[in-house]
Image (cartoon, rainbow, N blue to C red):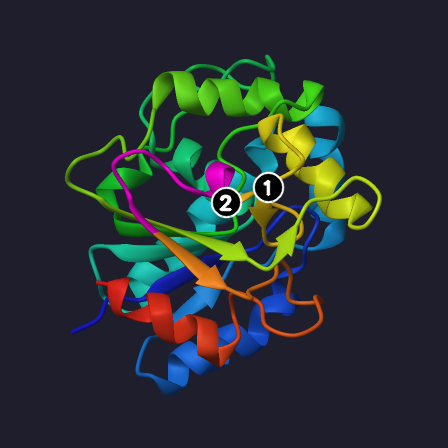
Amino acid sequence: MILPTVILPGYFARGTDYVALAEILKQKGIPGAIVPLRKLDWLPTLGGRSVVPVLRLIHDTVQGVLQKYKSDRVNLLAHSAGGWIARIYLGDIPYTIHGDVTAKDGVWQGRDRVASLISLGTPHVSQERWTKRNLDFVNNNYPGAFYSDLKYVCVAGKAVYGKQWESWLAYNSYKLTSGEGNTWGDGITPIAAAHLAGATNLTLEGVMHSPRSPGLWYGSPEAIAHWVDYLV
């Protein structure tokens, strides 16, 4: 029996942006829920501030899904920044770098309730000044596919090559993320940043970053077919 799946939206995205993805999974016999984020919920995290408000919503959603489906674990399906935020949720080291919570309240230890983490277009590294602080916490404390008893699957898209004058947005986004703009990615996240050492790393041709992108994105049926079997 496939475990229920909790979908975690990307940065400044709303839970409602992922309803179509959740419906496709439901039709495949995969139950679950979307972390009910609104744009307002992201406001306290702007400028590289603490993501504790998002972590609390993840925790509440996971607990609700475990109870609803009488399961002891879930899959986490995390898009974009949701992937590195999920890695904080999994951990047992206090996330107190912003001074907004105590050590006791800064630990979620979600690995006890999660069987697999599938990240879609997640920038697992960053050179950007503000984001780097949070991501350095993640990568210094939980490098790569950190927990050996948990399945990590990292999915990258290969749709746009960054060129400074021809694909300005992709070039600058890639450069802020990985330090290199002339590379392939999904238009926002470069392939190199979307993969983790020790994980099952997939690269999907022609797949764009966002549900609002033209053409295929990670939640399109054609793309889902490449990663859905990794749900446990």
Mark 1 nearby-residue class (10 Å; few <14, some 14–19, many ≥20): some
Please, what is the three-letter code of the amino acid marked with disc 1?
Answer: Thr
Instruction: Specify the quadrant of the image occupied by residue 227.
Output: bottom left
Nearer to us of marks 2 and 1 is 1
Instruction: Please give the name of the residue rendered at 23% of the width and 55% of the height, measured from the top-left corner.
Output: 73
Q: CA distance from mark 2 to mark 1?
A: 8 Å
Give how far across and how far down residue 141 sits, in percent: 36, 18
Q: Is residue 49 visible?
A: no
Give how far across and how far down residue 190 sits, in percent: 56, 43
Q: Which residues are magenta?
A: 191-201
Instruction: Please give the name of the residue rendered at 78% of the width and 46% of the height, measured from the top-left corner.
Output: 169
Decide if residue 26 is on the left or right side of residue 17: left
Q: Is residue 199 magenta?
A: yes
| Location of the N terminus (image quadrant) | bottom left
Decide if residue 83 is on the left or right side of residue 185: left
Q: Is residue 174 magenta?
A: no
Q: Residue furthest right?
A: 165
Please, what is the three-letter code of the amino acid marked with disc 2?
Answer: Ile
Instruction: Specify the quadrant of the image occupied by residue 89.
Output: top left
Give how far across and how far down residue 103 sits, in percent: 43, 15
Decide if residue 120 is on the left or right side of residue 54: left
Q: Are marks 2 and 1 in contact (CB under 8 Å)?
A: yes
Q: Is residue 68 above or below residue 194?
A: below
Q: Earlier in the sequence, mark 2 or mark 1?
A: 1
Give how far across and how far down residue 150 sits, in percent: 21, 43
Instruction: Please give the name of the residue rendered at 44% of the width and 24% of the height, measured from the top-left corner.
Output: 138
Is label 1 in a helix, a strand or a loop?
Answer: loop
Q: Which mark is residue 191?
A: 2
Identify the residue position indicated by label 1 in the image: 183
Is label 2 in a helix, a strand or a loop?
Answer: helix
